[in-house]
Image (spheres, rainbow, N blue to C red):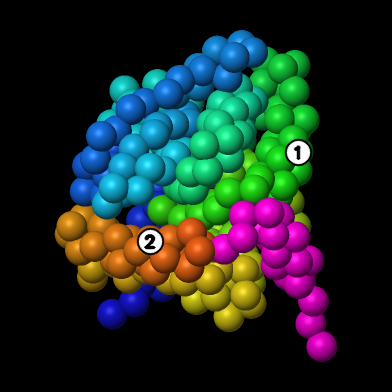
């Protein structure tokens, strides 16, 4: 039985949900991690690697969730700093140079909004990513593993194909944040969640999400192999299509895809 909206919200708040590090060995081989933004530092909230997917070289960029309190602190509660976004675009440009597809795993409540992050240009870093990912002449694929929160998620969400796991959410702000801002009452979180239309099914119906990947009953934590196999089948089909595209034409097609969002008759 599908989970209701608040069951999904609560599921994504738990520490038990699989992270990129559980999926990596199930999907890829010859994994080489790449660190640093070449400006300031390495951000552990954003993981980057070059690896093989069935003998196809691919660049993986992923926002890192935690499965323990210690890990949660290390990755800054999954909220990337500007250096995380600058690392992401550095690796994406490198992928473009070598004609590798870019696969982004989205899983963040939002970008970090602390003083240091703002001083180092958080808004500029995300804005530059939106522009530069749109212009990449190589396939860009994104998958929302759990939370897709605000510009923090969109910083690696400008893609030719976007998929979501069945219980993932993708939104401009969290339901509790929405209720706090709109009604000054965080207790109306459920009402906000239902009003916002942020589930995979909602976003698929609006054309924001291109595919939904099934999870086992109770969520991916109950059978990660099942979920990984769903990702594998989806990725197979998407790569088969995008690797045969004219890479020079991808930026315009990507642009038109996003221009159509939000248009209704």
Q: Residue at the location (64% across, 13% down)?
A: 39
In the rendered structure, which segment of residues is drawn in magenta? 245-265
Q: Residue at the location (66% across, 45% down)?
A: 136
Q: Main secondary structure of the magenta part?
A: helix
The picture places residue 13, in percent across and down from the top left corner, at 40, 48
Q: Nearer the viewer, mark 1 or mark 2?
A: 2
Mark positioned earlier in the residue sequence (1 or 2): 1
Is 177 in front, or is 146? 146
Inter-mark Cα distance, 1 to 2: 27 Å
* Looking at the image, residue 14 lies above or below residue 223: above
The picture places residue 199, in percent across and down from the top left corner, at 51, 68
Outermost residue, bottom direction?
265
The picture places residue 200, in percent across and down from the top left corner, at 49, 69
Q: Is residue 154 left or right of residue 163?
A: right
Q: Residue at the location (58% across, 49% down)?
A: 138
Local packing at callout 2 (Cα closer than 10 Å; few below 14, some 14-19, many 20+) is some
Is 78 in front, or is 93? 93
Can residue 189 be seen at all in this image of the molecule? no
Per the image, is 259 magenta? yes
Residue wearing tag 2: 235
Outermost residue, top direction?
40
Residue wearing tag 1: 127
Local packing at callout 1 (Cα closer than 10 Å; few below 14, some 14-19, many 20+) is some
User: Which quarter of the image is occupied by the N terminus?
Assistant: bottom left
């Amino acid at each position: 039985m599908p989970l209701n909206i608040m069951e999904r919200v609560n599921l994504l708040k738990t520490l038990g949900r699989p992270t990129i590090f559980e999926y990596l060995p199930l999907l890829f081989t010859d994994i080489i991690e790449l660190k640093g933004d070449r400006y300031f530092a390495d951000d552990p909230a954003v993981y980057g690697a070059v690896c093989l997917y069935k003998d196809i070289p691919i660049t993986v960029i992923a926002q890192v969730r935690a499965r323990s309190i210690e890990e949660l602190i290390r990755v800054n509660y999954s909220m990337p700093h500007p250096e995380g976004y600058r690392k992401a675009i550095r690796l994406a440009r490198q992928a473009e140079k070598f004609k590798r597809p870019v696969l982004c795993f989205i899983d963040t409540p939002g970008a970090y909004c602390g003083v240091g992050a703002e001083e180092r240009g958080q808004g500029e870093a995300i804005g530059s990513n939106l522009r530069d990912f749109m212009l990449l002449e190589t396939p860009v694929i994104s998958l929302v593993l759990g939370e897709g929160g605000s510009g923090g998620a969109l910083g690696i969400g400008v893609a030719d194909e976007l998929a979501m796991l069945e219980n993932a959410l993708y939104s401009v702000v969290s339901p509790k944040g929405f209720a706090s801002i709109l009604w000054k009452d965080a207790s109306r979180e459920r009402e906000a969640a239902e009003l916002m239309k942020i589930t995979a099914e909602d976003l698929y119906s609006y054309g924001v999400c291109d595919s939904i990947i099934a999870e086992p009953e109770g969520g991916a934590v109950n059978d990660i192999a099942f979920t990984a196999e769903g990702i594998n089948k989806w990725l197979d089909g998407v790569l088969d299509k995008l690797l045969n595209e004219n890479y020079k034409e991808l930026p315009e097609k990507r642009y038109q895809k996003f221009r159509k969002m939000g248009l209704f008759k």
